[in-house]
Image (cartoon, rainbow, N blue to C red):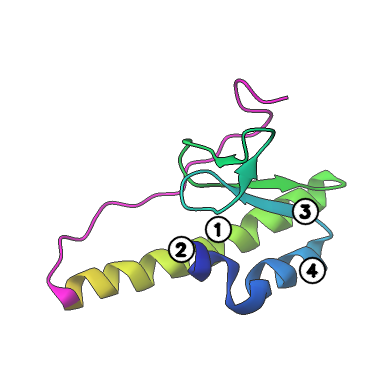
């Protein structure tokens, strides 16, 4: 999933960042991002954190990320159907503002 979201050499995230000026960080299980002093991956669900300079940039980033994620979900569901695996229910869940326990 992480590779599909990032794209080849981070191409998907770079394109969104260049288009909007936003910063994005993939964190949580499977992200490969090592947190703080522990240098361990978070046990939180995989998430994409977005920081933007203004509301317009933020909204455009959310729109582009949603478009990207929906495309990844379609690819995954197609893969599951073709391989005979059960197709999971996948959805985007958004949380705006700092998450509980963050700095």
Residue 76 versus residue 45 in the image, above or below: below
Q: Is residue 76 above or below residue 26?
A: below
Residue 50, position as x, y percentages in the image: 70, 47
* Circle 2/circle 4 CB separation < 8 Å: no
* Residue indicated by mark 4: 19
User: Where is mark 3, residue-wise?
Assistant: 23
What is the C-alpha distance between the residues marked 3 and 2?
20 Å
Q: Is residue 47 left or right of residue 57?
A: left
Quadrant including the N terminus: bottom left
The alpha-carbon separation of the residues under discs 3 and 4 comes to 11 Å
Classify mark 3: helix, strand or loop: strand
Identify the element where label 2 is drawn: helix
Coordinates of residue 52 in the picture (x, y in percent): 81, 48
Q: Is residue 40 left or right of residue 21?
A: left
What whole-number distance in Å separates the C-alpha atoms at marks 2 and 4? 19 Å
The mark that comes first in sequence, 3 or 2, is: 3
Q: Which residue is mark 2?
A: 70
Q: Look at mark 1 in the image and give the residue it sits on.
A: 66
Q: Are marks 3 and 4 in contact (CB under 8 Å)?
A: no
């Amino acid at each position: 999933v992480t590779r599909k979201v990032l794209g080849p050499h981070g191409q998907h995230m770079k394109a969104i960042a260049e288009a909007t000026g936003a910063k994005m960080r993939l964190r949580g299980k499977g992200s490969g991002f090592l947190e703080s002093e522990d240098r361990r991956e978070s046990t939180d669900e995989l998430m994409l954190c977005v920081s933007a300079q203004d509301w317009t940039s933020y909204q455009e980033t959310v729109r582009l990320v949603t478009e990207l994620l929906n495309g990844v979900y379609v690819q995954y569901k197609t893969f599951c159907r073709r391989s005979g695996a059960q197709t999971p229910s996948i959805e985007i869940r958004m949380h705006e503002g700092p998450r509980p326990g963050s700095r």
